[in-house]
Image: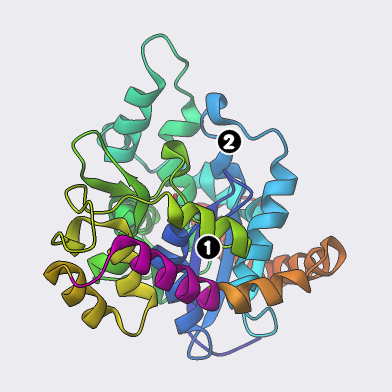
Amino acid sequence: MSDKKRILSGMRATNPRLHLGNYEGALRNWVRLQGEFKVYCMVADYHALTTMAEMPPDLARNSMEVAKDFVAAGIDPDQSSVFVQSMVPEHAELHLVFSMVTGLGKLERVPTFKEKKDDLGEGRMVSYGLLGYPVLQAADILLYKPFGVPVGKDQAPHLELSREVGRSFNAAFGVDVFPEFKDIIDEDESRSKVPGLDADDQGVLRKMSKSYDNCIYLTDSPDEIASKIKGAFTTPTKMRKADPGVPEGCAVCQYLRLYSSDWQRQWEEDRAGERGCMQNKADLTEALNEFLRPFRERRSDLDDASMGAILKRGAEEARDIAAQTMREVRAAMHLMPL
Ligand code: TRP
């Protein structure tokens, strides 16, 4: 077993493909932390089941494809453990234990719960599992007693609740099973909040999200990238090249900032009316395709059989740690040992 400090993070298997927002908001950090830490990269399949309305038709397929995107993004399965949540049954077990030490009021106040509940609308069933979403996430995290958890900013409330759950467990049973952990959140807003290709009805950029159909996927082909960028939102008042642009409000300029080494000059020229949107789009298409090239290469090497083997090994490595934590949990609670 590695004596490196551990990092745990996860992504929901709601969709079979990850987009640039998923990469910039979290995955980029996971890749960066490899080497210094032992990174546990989890595909959260149970978390994809928390709302019936969104239940994916083929969850196993989603899990497989998301795991492939992890590896394509640079997670090295020889250094890091890539696994699927439900393949490590200790997650479900610790979730049950944690549900006993978590107050209802606390869960009802979690902002993501309120949002999801409102999204579902009147009369729709709100599951016990949806309310318990952060309890399961606490189990995901604390099973590994990690040094830190790299996530996007939107996950901060979940991490805070996870900490409280760990403390409640320790206090309830008079033990010190679960240590504190850090959140590793990328503070660079322009990276962690990648805008989508479009704008809202006020002409303001909004986040990249499948529900808005404004995503660039890590698996998009060069042609798809070109045609998506062609249709991307730019400064609405910039009708021709000589009109001044507002790079801060232009999706194409935002991506140039992330993927073009020459973005400062490009922004200046855009602002000064010395460069047109067509030129920006052509430059971005080239830069983004260059950026995504190693993803495509790594992904084309991955078939289901090789990814399946990586996931099996990853689950075994994860279970080594998770089962040990559960032994401590059982002892602390005076449950029968297994
Ligand atoms: N809730 C996280 C998200 O929506 C996914 C997740 C599940 C997670 N379990 C986790 C993230 C544990 C970090 C640690 O992105």
Asked if residue 290 is among those painted magenta in the image, a careful observer would answer yes
109 on left or right of 211: left
Asked if residue 51 is among those painted magenta in the image, a careful observer would answer no
Residue at (28, 51) in percent of width and height: 157
Depth order, front residue of 142/72: 72
Q: Residues within 10 Å of mark 1 (few under 14, many from 20)?
A: many
Picture coordinates of residue 115, whole percent (x, y):
31, 32
Cβ–Cβ under 8 Å for marks 1 and 2: no
Query: Is 105 placed above or below 101 here?
Result: above
Instruction: Tell me, yes or no, if residue 322 can be seen here.
Output: yes
Picture coordinates of residue 270, whole percent (x, y):
20, 69
Picture coordinates of residue 317, whole percent (x, y):
69, 73
Query: Is 134 placed above or below 211 here?
Result: below
Separation (CA) of disc 1 from disc 2: 21 Å
Give the number of the disc on residue 226.
none
Instruction: Tell me, yes or no, if residue 167 can be seen here.
Output: no
Give the number of the disc on residue 49.
2
Residue at (41, 32) in percent of width and height: 131
Q: Residues within 10 Å of mark 2 (few under 14, many from 20)?
A: many
Residue 277 in which image quadrant:
bottom left
The quadrant of the image that shows the C terminus is bottom right
| Residue that lies at the very extreme toward the top in this rendered image | 123
Q: Which residues are magenta?
A: 274-291
Report the residue marked by disc 1.
143
Q: Nearer the viewer, mark 1 or mark 2?
A: 2
